[in-house]
Image: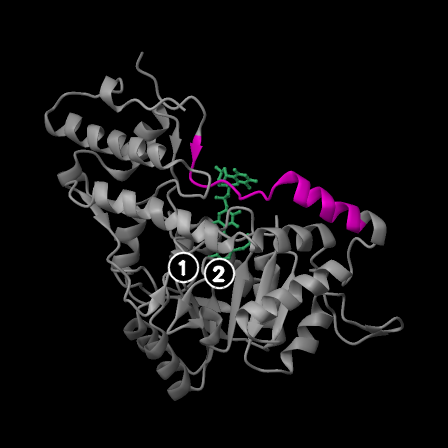
Amino acid sequence: MIKPFEKPIYVTRPFLPPLEEFSRGLEEIWGNRWLTNNGPILKRFTQELSNLFDTNNLCLFNNGTLALQIALQGMGISGEVITTPYSFVATTHALFWNKIRPIFVDIEPEFYTLDPKKVEEAITPWTTAILAVHVYGHPCKLEALADIAERHKLRLIYDAAHAFGVRVDHKPISHFGDLSMFSFHSTKLFHSIEGGMLIFREVGLKGLFDYLKNFGFKSEVEVVMPGTNAKMNEMQALMGIQVLKYLNEMILKRAKITNIYRARLKEVPGIRLVPMLSPDIEYNYAYMPIEVDEKEFGMNRDALYERLKEWNVHTRRYFYPLICDYSCYRSISINGDLPVARRVADHILTLPIYDSLELFDVDAICDIIISLHQGKRSKTQVTVPPTELVKIV
Ligand code: T4K
């Protein structure tokens, strides 16, 4: 019997620790009767992350978006910030909430990160910072951006939402730039249900961020700035501590999944894979992006996205549309035509990747993609999955 996957295969699924482990943690929370506001589990989680990232200049938040907003506010960023249109919309929202004008410039075609040449061309007297994204966990051009920032006296801020666990030259990715923001959302490789983290160079920012995420309270009777509420709670911290124990295992499994996709799809006409990262980068395998070329593959990205749904495979078009093409940002300044970002956004598809995805299911997804290509090339409409490809889950 020919059948698509019985259960949906999503682009990602969150890792969940064994329920008994989480229950034991909940018992501790019940015992403490401390649910939020800098509780003991949050302090423990902060310490574990400080050890992992080898820094005390670290602050936790209830999500990555508020973390980034607070970072910009605390650092006093204003005027114009040069950033990428090729990201999740929250990157630009964080600027908007700080009344900063985003200046979108183009990305590089290989790893989809900001093109340093375009960044330099877009600098004006109002530019105060660069906000670059390690998109999919691919490190930006770190040296080139640092050099530009230094020469033009700009702050260099990284949206490292996708880059937890990435290391460059044996150093955590947060070692680079003035500040990095990590997202711990459930759809991320590492998560705390929701959550965010800032790691920064300037020691003095820690106190400021702590005020800003807690209404600006310095003491019970003193509010020193108009802060917001962006605190991580004890349940989030507990999940974070428990997921952290499995980080290496999760990365290893994702590496295996990536290897299968790469091996099976590399010779499929019209499928472009991201080139191999340089050996000094320890990657986290956060996403599995491919580009689809209509002429060679036989159907365009959107058709493949729809056809895969028929097989119960739910891919995503991260990141389409470009941020500058959302109605709320259309009137905002773009530097140049963004030809690379536009091409990538129109061709990109991110395939399912998560620790609990079975390797034989990854093979089956590849089989389906290959059969869809072959069906189109031979002008045979593939309307039902061929028998030999079926892997029922
Ligand atoms: N900067 C960048 C570069 C980012 O990518 C993000 C977030 C941020 C900043 C902001 O960080 P946070 O404030 O979120 O911490 C998701 C996430 O909500 C978002 O965190 C993430 N980037 C973005 C790339 O993806 P959606 O709307 O695509 O997620 P959703 O709900 O459609 O989930 C995708 C799939 O995951 C579902 O089809 C099924 C699966 N899923 C999802 C959830 C939430 C589960 O199986 N279980 C779950 O609990 O935005």
Q: Which residues are magenta?
A: 9-29
Asked if 243 appears above or below 95 in the picture, the reply is above
Q: Which residue matches tag 1?
A: 137
Residue occupying the point 49% across, 52% down: 328
Tell me the crowding category of disc 2: few under 14, some 14 to 19, or many 20 or more residues within 10 angstroms, Cα based.
Answer: many
- Answer yes or no: is residue 9 visible: yes
Q: Position of residue 22 (x, y in %)?
A: 68, 44
Taking the image as shown, residue 337 lies to the left or right of residue 328, namely left
**283 relative to 115, above or below:** above
Kindly identify which residue carries mark 2: 164
Label for residue 171?
none
- The crowding category of the residue bearing disc 1, from other C-alpha atoms within 10 Å (few below 14, some 14 to 19, many at least 20), is many
Above or below, 264 relative to 176: above
- What quarter of the picture does the N terminus occupy? top left
Where disc 1 sits, the SS reads: helix
Residue type at mark 1 is Gly
| Image position of 242 (left or right of 357) | right
- Report if the CB atoms under discs 2 and 1 are less than 8 Å apart: yes
Q: Is residue 88 left or right of residue 144?
A: right
* Residue at horizontal 34 percent and vertical 33 percent from the top: 360
Residue at point 75%, 74% (across, down): 225
Residue 138: x and y in percent read: 36, 61
Amino acid bearing label 2: Phe
